[in-house]
Image (cartoon, rainbow, N blue to C red):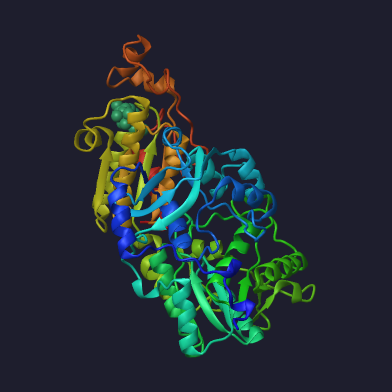
Amino acid sequence: MTDIKNLPHGGRLIDLCVDEDRTSLLKKITKDLPDITMNDRQMCDLELIANGSFSPLAGFMTQKDYEPVLDRMMLENQLVWPLPVCLDINETTARNLEAGQSIALRDPEGFLLAVMHVEDIWPIDKNREAEKIYASTDASHFGVDFLFHSTGDYYVGGPVEVISLPMHSDFKQLRMTPSEARNLYKKLGWQRVVGFQSQKIIHRPEFEITISAMREARANLLLMPVVGMTHPDNFDHYTRVNCYREAGRNYPPETHVLNLLSHSPRNAGLREALLHAVISKNYGCSHHILEQVDDLPNGNKKSTKPIAHKKLLEFSENYGEQIGISVMAYDKMVYLPFEDEYRQKHKIPRGSKTIVFTGQDIRDRIRTGRKMPEWASFPEIINCIQKAYPPPSKQGFTLFLTGLSGAGKSTIARVLYSKMMEIGNRPVSLLDGDIVRHHLSSELTFSKEHRDINVRRIGFVAQEITKNRGIAICAPIAPYARTRREIRDMIAVHGGFIVVHVSTPIEECERRDRKGMYAKARAGLIKGYTGVDDPYEIPEFPEIRIDTSDITPDEAAQQVLLYLGQKGFI
Ligand code: ADP
């Protein structure tokens, strides 16, 4: 008899991949079906639904499941389920679809992944979803921002038949499905396994937690780094997985298995933590490690505070029982320098001297080239991160000069280009407005939409240059805060991103009117000119702000060079 504890969530491990006959039949019918091109988040979800990580889901949620998930963290059938796993579509697609139809789900290259049989389509109440899931509608939170700005306005729900799982060409040997993992435990003779899933790298505190959980549960360890979409603040997944491999050497031999999880994190606090427990359950774990989480998701930095350990324990016990897995709640690990050891925060006597390093502290230290104390991590892991994220003097960086036309961006950019070439330790590219327009964007007009596309293209090229450790000097007007933020998110993961707001007031720019454009705009000959009849959204927190009204171009460039020197880039 199978012990209920060993069964997947809901009693059945889902496998939605169809056999060859069904595949050829589906391929034939898809020729006449409407298509949906899936984004990265949706492909991660599809993979986890298809391979049984999200058992008992057998497709994207219908509204009958979605509503109780929002309200009570439960599916329609009363099984615990904390987060919506829905397929979002835009309004045009929604209007052309109806229940009973089938649709072809494709990857961005057009490759057929699955067929979905539509059961329902409904408009998303995004404010409600944000409040329920993130307890906030503040788009400074990663998950809220994704919901409001990168999610379509409708959901479409229904079962899927999977023809091909999304392809991965990296770390193929580290990608087991839940049923493969279960078979492996059998082969290894493992009856008790504790699951640990994290977007973070394993430093000392995480290592201490996993070792302590293994001992307490008398279990082996399933280490699952989360490698779906990477949060812009985080290290790339190649580096993280390499660090997990290094961390693996610190465990006793043959006591752990490393397996990647293509989950796209929502950063949804306890709800997200609970989803990980469900995934562990499906991966055949008897135990699951729940790390300390904030009461509100972590994008909401101002108002977050850690959940009291007692509350976390109650939560783990209650939901663990319902899911059928022992959830082991761990408090924040803090370091006691005098004792030279880690302990859970609530176990430390009042008044003890402690030090805490958050994941963010570690990332900041690495990125700014500061040393890591020995107690915080392992030398091999730090080495591994430093190879991918060298100190600023060896990083690439982007200087992003933004401001009104005539503010002085190009002039300063040219001076900076010469200075960087003089220094001569990195390749330098100048992505000035006119040059970019000529080579990359010659078909674009100066409409609002096209100007935004142009800035994104500049951002893309600058990202590649920064990634390859060169210097990109960009000088677009880039009037919209949202586009600038998008570009920062793209580039800052690869190196330095320095916004230089050339803040010369419009009166001075207009007085200069180098190209006679302000005169034309004032005369109504050109429309949508930034500063005249289109807004320039002033950067709130640029790294540098320079008003060139009363200084020379060399003095302006000097301010940038001093900043770069101070931050260790040159
Ligand atoms: P933008 O690229 O912002 O449209 P440009 O650099 O093409 O602006 O033009 C700025 C004009 O202002 C040039 O004629 C430049 O000589 C003049 N200028 C005066 N002082 C400065 C300064 N400190 N920095 C940059 N440009 C300056």
Residue furthest to the left: 439
Where does residue 145 sit, x and y in percent of width and height? Answer: 53, 44
Q: Is residue 259 above or below residue 139?
A: below
Where does residue 238 sit, x and y in percent of width and height? Answer: 38, 67
- Give the quadrant of the N terminus: bottom right
Between 248 and 79, the one lying in front of the other is: 79
Between 31 and 458, the one lying in front of the other is: 31
- Residue at 34% across, 62% down: 394
Q: Is residue 132 above or below residue 371?
A: above
- Give the quadrant of the C terminus: bottom left
Residue furthest to the top: 523
Q: Is residue 536 above or below residue 544?
A: above
Q: Is residue 150 above or below residue 186?
A: above
- Residue at 53% across, 53% down: 85
Where does residue 236 sit, x and y in percent of width and height? Answer: 41, 62
Where does residue 437 sit, x and y in percent of width and height? Answer: 24, 33
Q: Which image quadrant shows ligand 1?
A: top left
As drawn, is 306 to the left or to the right of 230?
right
Is any part of residue 545 visible from this angle?
yes
Between 513 and 23, the one lying in front of the other is: 23
Q: How many marks?
A: 0
Is any part of residue 286 visible from this angle?
no
Residue furthest to the right: 350
